[in-house]
């Protein structure tokens, strides 16, 4: 019998490829599951409430979820790159930027949402139904155009060789979303817009920042661990701001004497309750990761709960998008 000897390095190379392929499949599966939340969520949340959803709510919620995710990625990269300057020692190799892809995806999502606004907040059946000029005649249309142009400018900033300038167009997206969420007919709309502005900005920093930190851990372990520790301290402040603004915003929508009832009898309340439970799970995972980072013999064991935290944060983003699509329970 002739024994064939494997070529040196072939088996090792295949072993290195398999985990990467497994991660890609896992990300794809998680992305599909996250997409199902805005797509199927409206009908589930509205079931038995007596409320009516606008046509195409699932598709609109999906587009907004994509827009939120596309916002988080470059904001997180910019945030973590700033934090890295405070890490002792020279920074290690940074992971490849996803900002160009995020800007392109965000542009497409914003364009889709703008087309909905251009047809009177209805999903267009054909291009002839889209009144582009009508976008300039309404407040929502102008805000939709701001978001489209902001993602376009963000992409140009990334390719211009000065990625630090991408923060300005991304800030415009956050401001536009905050204003869109609170129409002028609402009671004290500027207060609501201010709360949403802080809430969305902190959420983007938290989710996008953690994703970028974890990607960096694969390239430079010592610097990555130090950066994760620094991020964890800042994330605690972000969580406090998100919680405070979220509670305040919810109480403006649902006064104290109706909160418990509306959490189960309205679509908005049900989605809000689901989001609160997800955020609580994220907070628990963040605490677990921080404990491991401080007290475990190997600080890298903090990656496991931190990765789970990123996954649940993705679900929070999807739930947040769904929350913008369901009917608001209180009519001002």
Image: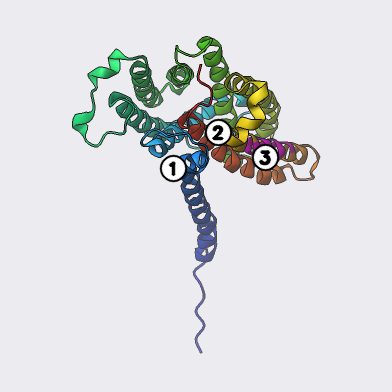
Q: Earlier in the sequence, mark 2 or mark 3?
A: 2
Residue that extends furthest to the bottom in the rendered view of this protein: 1
Residue at coordinates 79% horizontally, 43% vertically from top-left? 296
Residue receiving disc 1? 39
User: In whole angstroms, how far apart are the C-alphas of marks 1 and 3?
Assistant: 23 Å
Residue receiving disc 3? 281
The magenta span reads: 277-287
Q: In this rendered view, identify the residue nearer to me: 331 or 287.
A: 331
Left or right relative to 307: residue 182: left
User: In whole angstroms, how far apart are the C-alphas of marks 2 and 1?
Assistant: 18 Å
Viewer can see residue 89: no
Secondary structure of residue under mark 1: helix
Q: Quadrant of residue 156?
A: top left
Residue 244: where, in percent of width, then height? 66, 21
Residue at coordinates 36% horizontally, 37% vertically from top-left? 56
Q: Quadrant of residue 102?
A: top left
User: In whole angstroms, how far apart are the C-alphas of marks 2 and 3?
Assistant: 23 Å
Secondary structure of residue under mark 2: loop
> Cβ–Cβ below 8 Å for labels 1 and 3?
no
Q: Earlier in the sequence, mark 2 or mark 1?
A: 1
Q: Main secondary structure of the magenta part?
A: helix
Q: Is residue 64 magenta?
A: no
């Amino acid at each position: 019998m002739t024994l064939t000897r494997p070529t040196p390095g072939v088996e090792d190379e295949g072993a290195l490829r398999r985990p990467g392929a497994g991660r890609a499949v896992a990300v794809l599966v998680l992305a599909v599951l996250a997409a199902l939340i805005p797509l199927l969520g409206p009908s589930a949340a509205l079931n038995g409430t007596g409320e009516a959803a606008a046509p195409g709510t699932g598709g609109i919620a999906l587009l907004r979820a994509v827009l939120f995710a596309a916002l988080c990625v470059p904001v997180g990269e910019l945030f973590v790159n700033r934090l890295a300057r405070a890490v002792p020692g020279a920074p290690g190799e940074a992971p490849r930027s996803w900002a160009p892809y995020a800007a392109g995806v965000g542009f497409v999502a914003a364009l889709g949402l703008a087309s909905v606004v251009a047809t009177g907040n209805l999903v267009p059946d054909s291009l002839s139904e889209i009144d582009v000029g009508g976008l300039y005649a309404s407040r929502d249309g102008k805000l939709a155009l701001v978001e489209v142009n902001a993602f376009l400018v963000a992409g140009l900033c990334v390719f211009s060789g000065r990625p630090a300038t991408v923060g300005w167009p991304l800030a415009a997206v956050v401001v536009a979303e905050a204003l869109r969420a609170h129409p002028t007919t609402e009671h004290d709309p500027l207060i609501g817009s201010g709360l949403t502005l802080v809430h969305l900005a902190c959420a983007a920093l938290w989710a996008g920042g953690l994703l970028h930190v974890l990607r960096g851990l694969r390239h430079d372990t010592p610097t990555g661990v130090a950066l994760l520790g620094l991020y964890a301290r800042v994330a605690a402040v972000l969580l406090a701001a998100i919680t405070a603004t979220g509670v305040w915003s919810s109480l403006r929508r649902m006064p104290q004497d109706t909160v418990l009832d509306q959490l189960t009898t309205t679509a908005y309340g049900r989605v809000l309750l689901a989001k609160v439970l997800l955020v609580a799970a994220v907070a628990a995972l963040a605490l677990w990761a921080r404990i491991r980072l401080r007290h475990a013999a190997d600080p890298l064991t903090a990656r496991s709960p931190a990765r789970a935290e990123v996954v649940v944060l993705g679900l929070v983003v999807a739930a947040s998008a769904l929350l913008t699509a369901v009917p608001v329970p209180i009519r001002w």
